Amino acid sequence: MNSPAATIPYFADAVERALAAAGGVELTAPAQVSGIDGRRVGRRTGNALEFSEYREYRPGDDLRRIDWRVYARSEQLMIKLFSEEIDPRCDVILDHSASMASTERKASAAISLAAIFTTAAANSGFSLNLWHAADAFRKDPAPASPLLWDFPPFETPFSPSANPASFSGQFFRRGIRILVTDLMGPDDPAPVLSRLADGAKRAVVVMVLDPSELEPEPDANVLLVDAETGEERELVLDEGALARYHERLENHRAMWAAAAASRGVLLLPLSASDFCPEIRPDELFRAGLLK
Amino acid sequence: MKDFFFGFEHSALLWFALPAALVLLLLYLLHRRSKVRIVSAIFLWDRPQASPTSGTRIRFRLPPAIFYLELAVLLLLAAALAAPFVSTPETFPPLAVILDDSMSMQAKVPGGKSPLESGAAFLKRELRDLPDRRVLWIVAGESPVLASDSSGRTDFAPFWTGQAPSSDLAAAAALARRMARGCHLLIVTDRKPAFELAPDTTCFSEGAPLGNSAIVNARRTAGRILVEAANFSSLPQDAALVLEPGSLRTQLRLAPKETRRIVLAVPDAAAHDAVTVRLENADPSTNALLCDDEAVLEAEDDSPVSYRVAAGFPAAARSALERVLNGNPAFRQAFTGETPDLDILPAEAESPSPVHLYWLASPKKKATPADQAEATENPPQSVDNAPSADGPLSPENSADISRGLPLDSLQWAVSADDLPGQTLLRSGDVPALSTRQNLNRDREIFLNLDPARSNITHHPFWPVFFQNLAQTVRTERFGPARTNLRAGELLRVRLPRGAQSLTAVRPDGKSTEIRAMRGQADFRPMIHGEWRLGSGDAKWSVSVMGLSAEESDLSGAGPFRRDADSLAVMPFWMLRPLAWAFLLLAAALLAAHHLVLTRKGGGPC
């Protein structure tokens, strides 16, 4: 087992801050409704279905869902709707690519986010898995105890999107899947998003970026070194170069946002400065991930 | 024909650019000047331009823009070192007019024209046809001076006065060649030049071997004036030497080519004033030059030396000093508050005076007051009953202060084992008298003598030494070293303490500021007449005499004409240096380099 404190000196601080912040929070379970909505037929069976409410029949609804007793009493075609009882399961996947540690703040924020999600899931009584997306896709033996995580360093030379095949099929079915990453890869987002969303009740991609990536400062000659590939590029960071960077970053985020939206995945962009050195999880509450 | 061409005088120096550029490149390669920043994804940043078919296995990183800026600066500096020039065609090469400014240019018979006047008329005629030609005006006096470099100037009278004691035409020609390469020379003089003329040199002389009598030398010292009068004509001359004030006349009959020395006594009434000696010819027509007939001589400064004796001397030394100073009219005691010319001190100390006499008079062994009193009252009368001397006296170096000092039967006893400065007199192995100049140019004289064990106060050495001392102090006083000198001679002026410069007002009223070096200003007055000098509150006058036997002797003067072989209209490529433009451009690029670095938020790391 890797000792996180030995390989990542700020690990314990980040986890302790996250545990303090996530003390009373829970992971929000999606209140999805299963049934016949007139447009598609749900195929999921679930472990248990509880009656939720009636609504009027609409053309295309499954006739088997009509409550004939109500029709007998009121001569109105009413459809019985059932709430699907979600099996509370959660997979948290943490990107261990080297770009996640391009700054200490960003790495610290990623650790804190993973710890917040796992702690909140544990608080909610979810079955929980923590996956380390490193060179190999690996399940942590103690997901609910962040201080005991078997935590590899942020050194993987590629991001999850570069190796979608590594997203194994071991995720919980019909659970919540949360991927903490920076999405900083030139690869096609579709495969990894499809694998993430497939069979999930809810799929969330938390995109955490450092302020130096969101708003880089002008500078003289700089030698940019790619954290993952080691590729170098020498630039003068003048206003023009920064404007072009912003444009590319926006395009990249828009591409991921479009890909996520088409697959029902929630893309949540966050700044590392909100989670390091102080944790301000307002965005997570606003997005309905935590309660 | 091409309008211009460009080149380098020392094109081999351009190769310096190659190692310089290589060094710069290596600096960029070996010492990376860019900050390293780890980024998450480099693809979000600018990509280098590449064609679809491009691609190499080895990637060279292109240097940043400032590398090319620095490379351009290096290339420009190397180019400037190689002396770039642009050459433009001109109809004529520049013309350097060399004006003989010696006194003999003023020689003329009554009603006639001097060589200077004839030369001026010739120049106006010549230059009238060349209104646009570049002309360098070089005044050939004792040393040549570039008076003007312009086109179309014909007003040369302000700087061509014919008053210099001599003229160096060869040096003037060399200066002209240096100032404008390829120029033609035009020499205006009163005789054929003594050097070989180049083919491109025109020479004009309207001089004539006229008769002349002159004062060729004059000196004033100790109330007397020594005058040398000469007759440079081939006939005997009757003349009179007139001394003013007083109009004292001395009749002379000078044989042809004779030079005679005459000694005149300065009237008592003019002992402290300037006097004028004038040579008046009986026949003015045989005296072609008037400016050499008069000499003004300022009074030499022979006022008594003011002195001050500091406290701390043994009684015997003080008594010996009083005896010799009170008996010598060349000395007087300084008034209260006056800075004395001479400070007499028992040991080295600060003093505002220009001359310090340090007399180390205390006995080597501690002597009782009774011994000192006895020594004062009963000085040794002979070698037999005198205290024992330290060793034989021997002069070592020569100086004004030690000149003619009698040493026979002199008993000397030293008080110290050594003296600083240059030893003038030695007693055995020990310096007895020495001198040096300190950083303020003050003269310091060290006397290593215990009077109690010496017969010095009763020996001729003592008054002669102080007479020499008075003479030394007079030459070290603040002010000009001499009050009478010839034009062109070096004049050294010692300035009062703290003065930074000397103002010299010429006889024509123009003034010059001369910077002082270590309290001393040196210059060569070239115009004869009375010069007024000043520094702060101090004022002095010096007489500069334009006396020169060579110039007064007009026998060598004569007409001479020579036209340049190539003074015809011909194209001439004028070389104009361009190094300044390259340096200017390099400076501008460096400024841009600086701006680039500062605007981008910091310099190279």
Image (cartoon, rainbow, N blue to C red):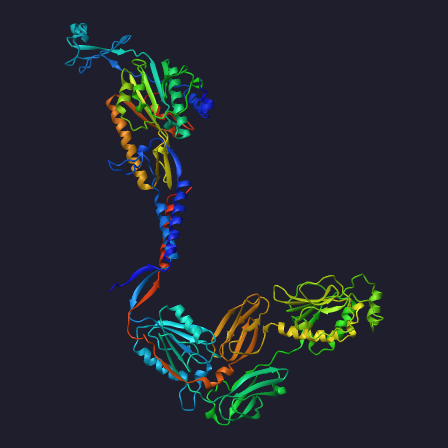
Looking at the picture, tell me which residue is in the foreground, A4 or A129: A4
Q: Is residue A279 visible to us here?
A: no
Image point 37% across, 14% down: which residue?
A128
**The quarter of the displayed image where residue B157 is located:** bottom left
Looking at the picture, tell me which residue is in the foreground, B188 or A146: B188
Q: Is residue B423 left or right of residue B524?
A: right
Q: Where's the N terminus of chain B, which quadrant?
A: bottom left
Looking at the picture, tell me which residue is in the foreground, B348 or A27: B348
Looking at the picture, tell me which residue is in the foreground, A157 or A115: A157
Image point 45% across, 26% down: which residue?
A10
Image point 27% across, 22% down: which residue?
A191
**The quarter of the displayed image where residue A50 is located:** top left
Q: Is residue A265 left or right of residue B354?
A: left
Residue B547 at x, y percent in the picture = 52, 82
Residue B458 at x, y percent in the picture = 79, 74
Residue B409 at x, y percent in the picture = 78, 73
Residue B40 at x, y percent in the picture = 35, 30
